[in-house]
């Protein structure tokens, strides 16, 4: 118990340090259903399902706005013959305007037992990103020509790696991760105009499940994202699990949006989730919200806990 409290206190210090840091811009995709899609930002999550599983997620942000972000994610994870080792794979296609990132990353995690039914996983993420941005396709003001917006940026197989840690039990989790440690710069092929294409993002996540009754559970969660050049961003959700079958809840993202989440659980193996959020900024007058659909499936489920997976 003393070890667990020291970890929690240490993560609180990290959160404070992240909050006082200045930043340089956020680029990694955001998700409304982040508490069920943790592997994309934290490699230590791989193996927590204690089975082989797949997840597919599609996110269309700011529907109706030209060039709005679209993100498609495929993740899988599995245990190995060594029950303490988890492996994972993530494929993310993220497009904003004419800018497109296609990423392929593998995950490795190792589990340590802290106490009965409480574990600490450490993870390593490694992979490559293909980046393309056709600068000349962007419309400019009539009569103006920006030399920096000529040609295109085409970067092939740019490597990166990251790290993460996750402390969890049946009814709570807290994690810290940096999914991309290498900061990369991109140049166009016309005049060597340079821009920072990949920045270092820090993520702190957590959640707890309260048993309100035999048929009702309450799970508040949070996600903190920080990077140099942008304000620290906080996501909060409040979810209710009805009869171990249906999740219903709401979310709030500081300075950005609020929304709603629903998820259906079929025999503990198949999950279908839907999330929608609406911006609180001036952009709300120009689009019809953000919509997100998630499907996950687990094979050979052998989890030690009798209740459905909580995160």
Image (spheres, rainbow, N blue to C red):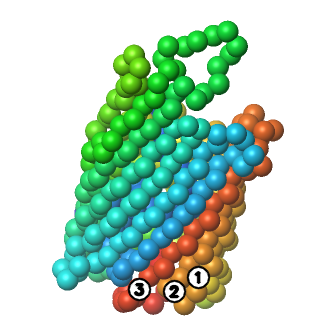
Mark closer to the observer (1, 3):
3
Left or right: where 41 falls relative to 165 = right
User: Which quadrant holds residue 33?
Assistant: bottom right
User: Which quadrant holds residue 66?
Assistant: top right
Residue placed most toward the observer, 170 or 280: 280
**Residue at left offset 28%, top offset 39%:** 182
- Which residue, given by chain and number where applicable, does mark 3 sit on? 299
**Residue at left offset 44%, top offset 74%:** 54
In x, y percent, where is residue 19? Answer: 45, 36
Q: Mark on residue 268?
A: 2
Residue 9 can be seen in this image: no
Other-residue count near label 1 (Cα within 10 Å), few / some / many at <14 / 14–19 / ≥20:
some
**Residue at left offset 56%, top offset 78%:** 271
- Mark 2–mark 3 distance (CA, rounded to whole Å): 10 Å
* Labels 2 & 1 near each other (Cβ < 8 A): yes
Counting residues from the start of the chain, the first of labels 2 and 3 encountered is 2
């Amino acid at each position: 118990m003393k070890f667990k409290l020291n970890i929690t206190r240490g993560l609180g210090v990290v959160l404070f340090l992240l909050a006082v840091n200045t930043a340089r811009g956020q680029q990694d995709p955001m998700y409304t259903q982040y508490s069920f899609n943790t592997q994309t930002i934290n490699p230590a999550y791989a193996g927590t399902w204690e089975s082989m599983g797949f997840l597919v997620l599609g996110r269309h942000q700011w529907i109706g706005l030209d060039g709005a972000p679209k993100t498609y994610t495929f993740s899988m994870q599995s245990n190995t013959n060594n029950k303490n080792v988890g492996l994972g794979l993530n494929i993310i296609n993220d497009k904003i305007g004419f800018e497109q990132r296609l990423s392929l990353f593998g995950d490795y995690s190792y589990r340590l037992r802290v106490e009965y039914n409480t574990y600490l996983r450490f993870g390593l993420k490694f992979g490559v990103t293909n980046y393309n941005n056709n600068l000349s396709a962007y419309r400019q003001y009539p009569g103006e020509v920006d030399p920096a917006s000529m040609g295109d940026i085409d970067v092939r197989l740019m490597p990166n790696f990251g790290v993460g840690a996750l402390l969890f039990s049946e009814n709570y989790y807290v994690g810290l991760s940096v999914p991309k440690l290498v900061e990369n710069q991109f140049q166009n092929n016309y005049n060597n105009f340079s821009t920072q294409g990949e920045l270092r993002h820090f993520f702190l996540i957590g959640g707890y499940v309260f048993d309100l009754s035999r048929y009702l559970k309450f799970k508040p969660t949070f996600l903190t994202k920080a990077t140099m050049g942008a304000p620290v961003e906080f996501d909060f959700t409040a979810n209710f699990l009805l009869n171990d079958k249906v999740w219903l809840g709401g979310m709030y993202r500081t300075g950005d949006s609020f929304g709603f989440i629903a998820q259906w659980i079929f025999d503990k193996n198949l999950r279908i989730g839907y999330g929608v959020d609406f911006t609180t900024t001036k952009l709300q007058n120009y689009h019809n919200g953000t919509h997100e659909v998630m499907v996950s499936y687990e094979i050979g489920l052998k989890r030690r806990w009798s209740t459905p997976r909580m995160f």
